[in-house]
Amino acid sequence: MTDVPVDGRHVVVHLRVRRLVCPMQGCRRQTFREQIPGLLERHQRRTVRLVRQISHVAQELCGRAAARLTNLLAMPVSRSTALRRLLQLPLPEQSVPRVIGVDDFALRRRQRYATIVIDAETGRRVAVLPGRDAATQESWLREHPGVKVVCRDGSATYAEAVRRALPDAVQVSDRWQC
């Protein structure tokens, strides 16, 4: 297995582990290898440290750029491997914003619409909901009970959804939105 390079040189770790026999009769896996937590994950050819570094590079650069940089850092991976490591990273936990802005927009004019929910204090997008009906908005609000203020347009649909899902929330109706 390969490890983090030292001074630009590849490091290969030769590891010997015990092969153990399952004592249970009729076990589907008759033999298995001993696992070493913190050094190597199951079926991996790279150490946990090397995988972590590749994941950090992939998180910053993604795809081809990550593959070029890891090649320069003497830990070459393909762009597919960089993307695979990126997809395996856990999503960051997002807190429920206190003040949100809700508005609809056209995906295809007069045919398909969606609803966007933004954090009104930071301006970052929180969610994009399919459609612009009250039921979709209401179910999203019920799943995120920490919302205290909802900025919305004059739509009666959104007003009803907020009233049913969060009766204590303050509604700010504004034609120009938050």
Image (cartoon, helix red, strand yellow):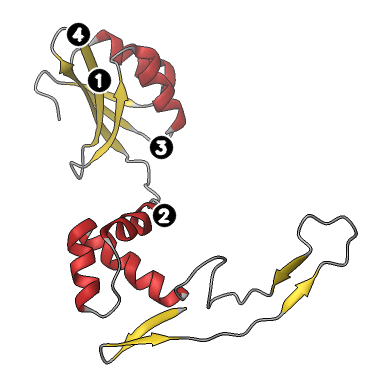
Crowd tier of the residue under label 1, counting other residues whose Cα lies within 10 Å: few below 14, some 14–19, many 20 or above: some
Nearest to N terminus: mark 3 or mark 2:
2
Badge nearest the viewer, 4 or 2: 2
Please state the horizontal and vertical placement of residue 174, each as a whole percent of the image. 14, 20
How far separated are the C-alphas under marks 3 and 4?
33 Å
> Which quadrant of the figure has residue 177?
top left
SS state under label 2: helix
Please state the horizontal and vertical placement of residue 147, each as a whole percent of the image. 36, 34
Badge nearest the viewer, 3 or 4: 4
Q: Which mark is residue 88?
A: 2
> Which quadrant of the figure has residue 29?
bottom right
> Which quadrant of the figure has residue 155?
top left
Crowd tier of the residue under label 2, counting other residues whose Cα lies within 10 Å: few below 14, some 14–19, many 20 or above: few
Crowd tier of the residue under label 3, counting other residues whose Cα lies within 10 Å: few below 14, some 14–19, many 20 or above: some
Q: Which mark is residue 146?
A: 3
- Location of mark 4 (residue): 111
Residue 19 located left or right of residue 141: right
Q: Which mark is residue 58?
A: none
- Location of mark 1 (residue): 114
How far separated are the C-alphas under marks 3 and 1?
23 Å
Nearest to N terminus: mark 4 or mark 2:
2
Give the residue at x 30% y 60%: 82
User: At label 4, which amino acid type do we have?
Assistant: Gln
Question: Residue 107, relative to residue 146: is it above or below?
Answer: above
- 76 or 165, which is in the foreground? 76
User: At label 1, which amino acid type do we have?
Assistant: Ala
Residue 40 located left or right of residue 60: right
